[in-house]
Amino acid sequence: MDFEEKIALNKALFSSLYDGEIQFFKSPLKAYRTRAEFSIYHKDNREISYAMHKNKKKIPIEKFDIADEKIQKYMPILVSNLNENLKHKLFGVEFLATKLDLSITLLYHKNIELIAQDLQELSNKLNLKLIARSRGKKLVFNGENLRQVLKINTNDFMYEFNNDCFIQPNTFINEKMIEWVISCIKNDFRQDLLELYCGYGNFTIALAQYFHKVLATEISKKNIEFALKNCFLNFIENITFTRLSSEELSQALKKEREFNRLKDVDLDSFKISHILVDPPRAGLTLSVIELIKHYENIIYISCNPISLKDNLEILCQSHEILNLAFFDQFANTHHLECGVYLRRKA
């Protein structure tokens, strides 16, 4: 699906809720994708190649030009080395790239401990962060954490995470999304920010300077560990990260339930003027919508226009859309990321 068709379809989707100007952010057409996952095609049990599934069939491929340049560079190098002695029972390869790093994960249908030495040698030879997985087993060679730098307007922000974290798959568009959020709120009267689904702090770190304090929640313990580290990397001291689901936070704010994880957090000290949500594809549950509609300003980042539209049908009863943006996260596909900025009606 080309960009113009995608935009037209989604403008029509939201036309009943918003008739103002929509901002569009277009992705590069090549070398934009930071995560790439491939099946492995075994040819006559002699050589392997990368493959993708189409119509329930494995289609061998030689290149993948939408992938980050580091991924494209290492694809032929890796498969050549795997063909020497590490192809047996290999069924998948995953690449994850940042501006600064690259990690590769190999997926096997066999006991990877039996090939640990060969995997270590491959990691050393190619100077790679290499991970191998099989049922119930995981081996890591030369580390698995990746460093990233995002340029947001004129500022650089440092991040660290691993491939178990949710990562925005298009760094160019990710930077544009964060800049768009800043453009929405920079002239507002701002006090404190509440962020749900904060992950390792992708939005949180860059937005912290615009608020007195930030309260950010996430259910993944590993994500919280990285988020705290990313505060340290960027010399940020006004963020409080808590490991709570959105439903648990709602219970805590309503004082319906006490959580030991909040024993050192004074929720009453936060004067929340803005809330940011970036939920999974299913969108927000009714209980979370009930929570966020009590705040003056709502920033909603969505990877699914359909679930977003359903949620906005409810939110627009109490709030009005001030800004709407489309982000072409996956060029030449039907997928579209959306950003919506809402304010409570007078």
Image (spheres, grey):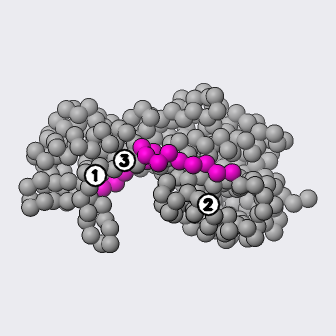
**Nearer the observer, 88 or 324:** 324
**Nearer the observer, 147 or 110:** 147
Amino acid type, label 2: Ile
Q: Along the polypeptide, which appears first: circle 2 or circle 1?
A: 2
Answer left or right for 37 relative to 234.
Answer: left
Q: Is residue 338 depicted above or below 34 in this figure? A: below
| Residue 244 percent across, percent down from the top left | 59, 54
Dot label at residue 93: 1
**Nearer the observer, 306 or 261:** 306
- Which residue sits at x=73%, y=41%? 183
Q: Distance between the residues labelled 2 and 3?
A: 24 Å
Amino acid type, label 1: Val
Question: Circle 2 — which element?
Answer: helix
Residue under label 2, please give it.
Answer: 7
Residue under label 3, please give it.
Answer: 65
- Which residue sits at x=15%, y=59%? 42
